[in-house]
Image (tube, rainbow, N blue to C red):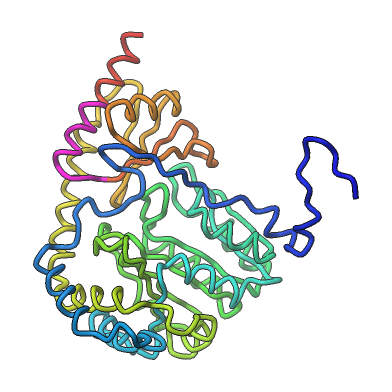
Amino acid sequence: MTSVPGTPDLAPLAGVRDEVRDTPAYPFTPIDAPFKLDQNESPLDFPPHLRKLAVERLLERDWNRYPDLHAETLKAKIGAYEGWDLAGVVVTPGSNVIIKLLMEMGGIGRRMLSVSPNFSVYELEAQMLGANLTRVPLRPDFGLDVPALQAELRRGGPGVLFLPQPHAPTGHLDTPADLRAVVDAAGDGWIVVIDEAYHQYSGSDYKSWVLERGNRLSLRTFSKAWGLAGLRLGYALAQPPLAENLQKLVSAFNVNTLTQAVAEVALEHPEYVTARAEETVWERERVLRELGAMQHLQALPSRANFFLLRTPDADRAYRFLLDRGLLVRRQDKQPMLEGCLRVSVGTRAQNDLLVTAVLDLDAELTNG
C-alpha cells in the first residue's frame, strides 16, 4: 500500500474499530494559571486534620497486599452514609468509569438517549461503543423538553437514558414534576441514570426514586463537594440485581488502598462536606447578584458549583480573563451555548477577582 503524501497511514490501525478511530478525544487541554476555575472542582482541599488521619490509616495498611476485591469495606461505609444496601453500591475510580460501564452493560448495539447540550463523556462513550445516540435539545431555559423525551422513549429501547440533576454544563435543576414525567416514561426498557454529581449544591436527592424500580440508578462522585477530585472515586446506588450486573464489568481490585483509606476517613467525617457546600452556594449566589446588572455579559442562574457566562465573543472574554490569571472553560462550541464560558465557583478571594475582571470586561465592551 502506497501512502498519499501528507495523509496519515492508517494501515497499522486496521485492527482498531471504526467507532473508536472516529470518536474525538475528551476535549480538555491543561493550562497553567494562578486561579483555576475551569473544572468544577472544590476550591478547598481535603481538611488538614482529616488528611493527617488518612495518612495514619494508610500507614497502618499493608502496601504489599491487594486492596479489597471490590472495595467492600468502602462500600459498607458508603452504604451507611447513604442509608443504602451495600449490595446495591458499585464503586469505581471516578463516576466517568461507571458511565463507560453503563454503556457497556446496556448500550452496545442499543440506544443511548440524553439531552443537548450535555456532559461530553456520555456522548463519547456512546460513540466508541457503537450505540445508537439520540440527543434531545433542551428548552431555551435549559429545562427538559418533556414531550420530546417521552416521544423518544416511546420509540422504544432497550438502551441507557442519562439525566443529570443538576445539569452540566448549564447548572439547571429541573422541577421534580418534569423529571418524574421523563423517568416514569422510560418504563422497564431502559437503564435510567440520574447523574447527581452536583446534588450537594442544589439540595436535590433522587436516590429514593431508585428504590421504586429496578432499572434506575443514581450516580455520585467524591470529586466535587467532597473535595477529592485527585483521588478519582465515584459510586452508583442501585437495587442489588442491577448493581450485581454492573459489578461484573468492574475490574478486580480497581480502587487502590490509598483512595480507600482517604474515602473511609471522609465518610466518617461528612460534616465538612455540608459546611463547604453551603459556603459554595452562598458564594455562587453572591457572585450572580454582583454580576446581575451588566450590559453586554450575562451570568446565568445555576444550582451547581459553577455557572455559565454568556458573552458576545467567547474567545475575547476567555483571553481577557486568562490575562487576569483566571482560567475558565469555553463552552461556546456546544449547541445553545454560543458565546458561553463555564465558570467554577472559587474561594471568596478568587470570586472577588473574577467579579472585578468580568465587570471590567463589560465596561470595556460598553466603552468600545
Q: Quadrant of residue 11?
A: bottom right
Residue 260 percent location from the top left of the image = 29, 78
Residue 298 percent location from the top left of the image = 34, 31
How many numbered marks appear?
Answer: 0
Task: Name the outermost residue toward the front.
Answer: 64
Q: Is residue 58 above or below residue 356?
A: below
Q: What residue lies at 76% left-to-right and 64% top-to-bottom? A: 15
In the image, is residue 350 part of the stretch drawn in magenta? Answer: yes
Q: Is residue 215 above or below residue 286?
A: below
Q: What residue lies at 40% left-to-right and 47% top-to-bottom? A: 170
User: Quick check: 120 left or right of 158?
Assistant: left
User: Quick check: 13 left or right of 3?
Assistant: left
In the image, is residue 313 part of the stretch drawn in magenta? Answer: no
Location of the C terminus (image quadrant): top left
Q: Nearer the viewer, residue 314 or 300?
A: 314
Q: Quadrant of residue 211?
A: bottom left
Query: The magenta stretch spans which residues?
Result: 345-357
Q: Is residue 313 above or below residue 198?
A: above
Q: What residue lies at 32% left-to-right and 66% top-to-bottom? A: 231
Q: What residue lies at 31% left-to-right and 47% top-to-bottom? A: 306
Residue 196 percent location from the top left of the image = 37, 65
Task: Name the outermost residue toward the top.
Answer: 368
